[in-house]
Image: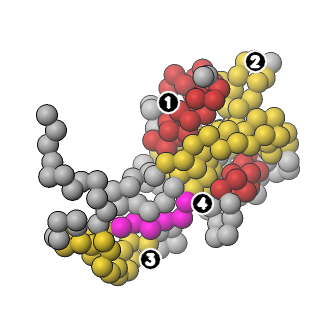
């Protein structure tokens, strides 16, 4: 038996929106919308740029590995091991952002960079898309070119360790678990 009123799959109509808070990372808005049954509600929406993350895969003499970045995260107040990535700049394609972030955070470029997935981080209140790319054929492109407040160490981590420990510290970033899932659909079909 399925519960519901039969309107759950219908779109709500946006009636208006007002900005509540603007920061360097996101904007919070309150949107008034009318439901398919006529009710009107207020909803808080977090507007944020789209993101691109790269899963750099290396077939090395010691076995398969991922090139990851170690950095402090202010939200969790912990050091995290993650795949390189960041915000897609205005006018930039997700692919170009992925290549740029890989080079900036690790000093490497990829011979092959292919999109393997895209999801909405939380469609209940966020407007952005998380794009995931698989990188292969890495070569040194130069040195890191980090933002003013970035302190990032690029490290090579055995793929078996990443797969085994994903979801535990320091691999606790939920979007990295998603990125690994998308990459492994290609790497381990």
Magenta-span inclusion, residue 46: yes
Location of the N terminus by quadrant is top left
Magenta span of residues: 45-50
Query: Splitting the image into 4 quarters, where does residue 42 fall?
Result: bottom left
Indicate left or right for 82 with 60 as reference.
left
Q: Label 1, secondary structure: give it.
A: loop
Q: Indicate the position of residue 64 as horizontal and vertical percent values.
A: 70, 22
Q: Are marks 4 and 2 in contact (CB under 8 Å)?
A: no
Res. 166 mark: 1
Query: Splitting the image into 4 quarters, where does residue 182 fall?
Result: top right
Residue denoted by label 2: 62
Q: Label 2, secondary structure: give it.
A: loop
The residue positioned 67% from the left and 69% from the top of the image is 91
Q: If you read the primary sequence from the N terminus, does the residue marked by circle 1 or circle 2 appear first?
A: 2
Alpha carbon distance from label 3 to label 4? 16 Å
Residue denoted by label 4: 87
The residue positioned 74% from the left and 43% from the top of the image is 113
Indicate left or right for 35 with 107 as reference.
left
The residue positioned 21% from the left and 56% from the top of the image is 7
Question: Is residue 74 placed above or below 18 in the rendered structure?
Answer: above
Indicate left or right for 82 with 172 as reference.
right
């Amino acid at each position: 038996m399925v519960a519901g009123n039969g309107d759950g799959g219908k779109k709500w109509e946006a009636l208006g929106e007002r900005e509540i808070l603007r920061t360097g990372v996101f904007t919070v808005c309150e949107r008034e919308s009318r439901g398919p049954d006529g009710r009107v509600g207020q909803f808080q929406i977090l507007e944020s740029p789209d993101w691109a993350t790269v899963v750099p895969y290396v077939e090395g003499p010691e076995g398969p590995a991922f090139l990851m970045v170690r950095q402090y995260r202010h939200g969790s107040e912990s050091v995290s091991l993650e795949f390189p990535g960041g915000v897609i700049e205005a006018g930039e394609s997700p692919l170009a952002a992925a290549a740029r972030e890989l080079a900036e955070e690790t000093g490497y470029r990829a011979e092959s960079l292919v999109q393997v997935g895209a999801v909405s981080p939380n469609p209940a209140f966020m407007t952005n898309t998380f794009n995931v790319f698989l990188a292969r054929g890495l070569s040194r492109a130069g040195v890191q070119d980090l933002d003013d407040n970035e302190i990032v160490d690029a490290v090579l981590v055995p793929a078996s360790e990443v797969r085994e420990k994903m979801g535990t510290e320091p691999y606790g970033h939920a979007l990295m678990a998603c990125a690994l899932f998308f990459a492994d659909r290609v790497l381990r079909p």
